[in-house]
Image (cartoon, helix red, strand yellow):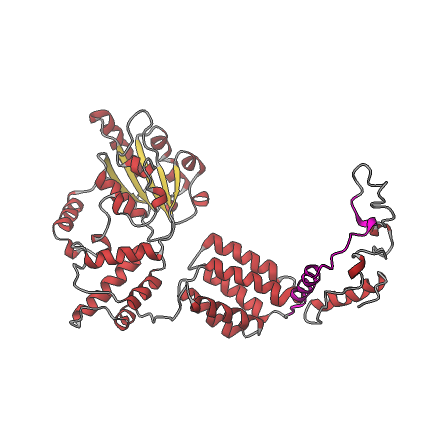
Amino acid sequence: MEPDLFTAAAEDRQEKDPAGSPLAVRMRPRTLDEVVGQQHLLKPGAPLRRLVGEGAKGPAGPSSVILWGPPGTGKTTLAYVVSKATDKRFVELSAITAGVKEVRAVIDGARRATGGYGKETVLFLDEIHRFSKAQQDSLLPAVENRWVTLIAATTENPYFSVISPLLSRSLLLTLEPLTDDDLRGLLRRALSDQRGLKGAVTLPEDTEAHLLRIAGGDARRALTALEAAAGAALDQDETEISLQTLEQTVDRSAVTYDRDGDQHYDVASALIKSIRGSDVDAALHYLARMIDAGEDPRFIARRLMISASEDIGLADPGALPLAVAAAQAVAMIGFPEAALTLSHTTIALALAPKSNAATLAIGAALDDVRKGMAGSVPAHLRDGHYKGAAKLGHAQGYVYPHDLPEGIAAQQYAPDGIRDREYYTPTRHGAEARYADAVEWTRAHLGRKGP
């Protein structure tokens, strides 16, 4: 669907009088060189540069692309830059409001434009994951025959939300969440740029840090919060956006948390120690602080996996599989939904029976090894598969446990120097009680004398 007279007039009015537009709109990059972040997609010769005519000459034309990334990472911005910079005909549709009829109208218009006056068409389709399979099918002929060059944007995994034939005909470009440095540069540009706040206010370091936490890698959210806070400061005849003004404006208090400093480690330590101490409420408090501060969810998940082995162990053998599953889920879904998975896991670990027996066991074994108490592997346990092993006495006299009624063979397994060492001392907590019984029984049947 081509922009109508009213849409064109609105866009023209925005360009002539930008003050009436939101700050996030006013600060949209006009060229690819102004784009913040995503530098891995903007190298010379990259698909997006070819779409705006940089190096797109010759028989190999620019490819259709699918832009996949979380909100606020620049998908719509990149399409906007292409629309301004390209000499091609640019049409924009949203899968929220458009259907097959609108898609076919664009394709028909593109074929007429190509045949009539040699003008290529770029179609930007936002929220493509909202299109049904049939609606996505309607794009295939146009993409395959290059009647249009498609730029499709999605926040959902395209391997689940975009049909395979369309994926195979397009390049999948993954956008990464913006870093704090990316957003910091954007905010400072918005403060000083004539299209932005024109130096009317300043942003102290503590306010900037809180604004970055609020943004969570989302440029649109960062600029929207900055604009609201700047407006509140100017209404109070202030030229500096204080932390208090920002907190009041966005209704969100600043949590003391430095992701690169002491707070990062102190709060993480408090989370794990609260889980170890079985205080589920304290553990959830520290988890919430980490989430609210924008901590990397993968870091939290890694700490929970360590806790499952270090502090719970065999008292609840299901703790580690749960923590591993949580880490996999967090990597797939990210925030905000990952908060639910992390809460689920934190509660389960905090309320699980505790045992550090596995931790102490490997520690004691490592200590002996490092003291030089390694010793030779008993001859009957050595590999006997290679030629000449029998002559060396390797694997001779080995008793196969499965051949015995009880499935256990009373033979020496450990080297001579540590044959009577006992590293694992199970507790009677939770499920580890059955392991305690098993250890007692097996050691007796192995003829172990104990330390």
Left or right of residue 292: residue 93: left
Residue 435 is situated, as x and y percent measured from the top left of the image, at 73, 65
The extreme front residue here reads: 372
Residue 344 is situated, as x and y percent measured from the top left of the image, at 52, 64
User: Is residue 365 rendered magenta in the image?
Assistant: yes
Left or right of residue 332: residue 15: left
Depth check: give the residue in front, 188 or 344.
188
Residue 108 is situated, as x and y percent measured from the top left of the image, at 27, 31
Depth check: give the residue in front, 31 or 134.
31
Q: Residue at x 30, y 58 (%)?
A: 184
Say which quarter of the image contains residue 225: bottom left
Say which quarter of the image contains residue 1: top left
Q: Residue at x 12, y 50 (%)?
A: 16
Q: Is residue 301 above or below residue 238?
A: above
Total marks shown come to: 0
Q: Quadrant of the C terminus?
A: bottom right
Depth check: give the residue in front, 59 or 265.
265
Q: Residue at x 68, y 71 (%)?
A: 429
Question: Which residues, given as a range, are shown in magenta?
Answer: 355-383
Residue 273 visible in the shown view: yes
Residue 105 visible in the shown view: no
Depth check: give the residue in front, 158 or 186.
186
Residue 312 is situated, as x and y percent measured from the top left of the image, at 62, 67
Q: Residue at x 78, y 38 (%)?
A: 386
User: Is residue 380 rendered magenta in the image?
Assistant: yes
